[in-house]
Amino acid sequence: EMAEADLAKITINNALRTKLRAAIARLSLSHPEPKVRLAAVGGMLERLQPESVPMLKARLGEEQDPRVREALQAGLSLADLGSGDRDCQLAAIVALSGNLTPAVRNQLGTLVESPDKDLAKAARKSLAAIEGKVQFYRGIETLFFGLSLGSVLVLSAIGLAITFGVMGVINMAHGELMMLGAYTTYLIQALMPGSLEWSLLVAIPAAFAVSGLAGILIEQTVIRFLYGRPLETLLATFGVSLILQQLVRTLISPQNVPVANPGWMAGSLEVNSVLSLTYNRLYII
């Protein structure tokens, strides 16, 4: 990325710029990290040049990583799509069927309007297979988001169910007790500005302790006098919830406050070009 940015600033002729890009691509394709090689191939696919094809062929013979090999083969098939040879184009369309790379979808989209009916039909069939896979992976992504949100809601529901089932108390301040745990995390991060990576590990047990102590205090001062009267516990804990909300507004802030993700929770697990699972949601689940 730094090399590309520097290259854009240099005033040179197009021929030399092309040679420099080829040299950068060659170095990236031989990088020991598969992620770097995959990114290099992805960049070449976005603007595939004739001079890139020999590099892709040479690298394909040496590549061991399956994802990088798939990307290299997609690049060679894309080159065949633009070759003008009808048989090569038909073979490339079949090879690219189901490939989720954006460059593949764009190139196949241009062939749908081809005057050659066989090419257009094959391109439409290949695009239909790709769209089917895209919809499938989007469904998985939606399910993943639902699980991450649902896991929090299930945790809240279990707490309410246990409180009512064991104590006979309708606790309207249940959300505010979870709120205290969240604000505990914020305050610990504020107290540990130079140790963001460790602050969350400190905040998790601290949040349990703060919420638990607040629950004991509410039970000792309010709830113990109302056992056996669930509707009155509902009204009493609703009042407690309003007190806790105002307490946080007064002592901390009436506005939302930020809680930062540590580095090991940032980023995402990229399954393919369509589906990526964010690490913070995985940790939440």
Image: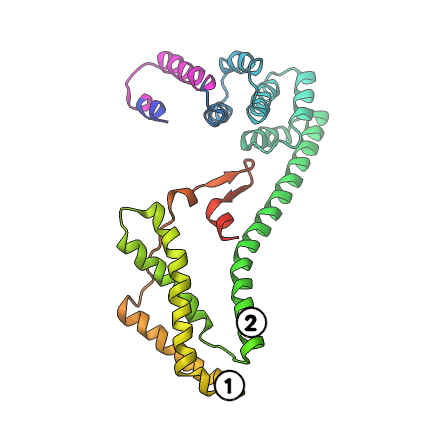
Mark 2, residue position = 162
Give the answer, above or below, for where 118 lies relative to 200.
above
Q: Is residue 247 above or below residue 110?
A: below
Residue 12 among those drawn in magenta = yes
State whether residue 77 appears in this view: yes
Residue 199: x percent and y percent? Answer: 34, 51
Q: Where, by quadrant of the figure, is residue 215 drawn?
A: bottom left
* Above/below status of 22 relative to 128: above
Q: Quadrant of residue 18?
A: top left
Q: Classify the position of the N terminus by image quarter.
A: top left
Q: Position of residue 2 (x, y in %)?
A: 33, 26
Residue type at mark 2 is Ile
The structure residue drawn at horizontal position 55% and vertical position 24%, both measured from the top left corner, is 68
Residue at left 57%, top 27%? 67
**Residue at image x 46%, y 16%?**
30
Percent from the top left, x then y, of residue 195? 30, 46
Q: Residues within 10 Å of mark 2 (few under 14, many from 20)?
A: few
Q: Position of residue 110 (x, y in %)?
A: 59, 30
The stretch in magenta equals: 7-30
The Cα–Cα distance between marks 2 and 1, rounded to whole angstroms, is 15 Å
Which residue position is annotated with label 1?
227
Q: Earlier in the sequence, mark 2 or mark 1?
A: 2
Q: Main secondary structure of the magenta part?
A: helix
Depth check: 44 or 111 in front? Answer: 44
Q: Is residue 46 magenta?
A: no
Q: How is the image coloured?
A: rainbow
Q: Residue at x 41, y 80 (%)?
A: 220
Q: Secondary structure at mark 1?
A: loop
* In this picture, residue 191 sits left or right of residue 180: left
Mark 2 lies on a secondary structure that is helix
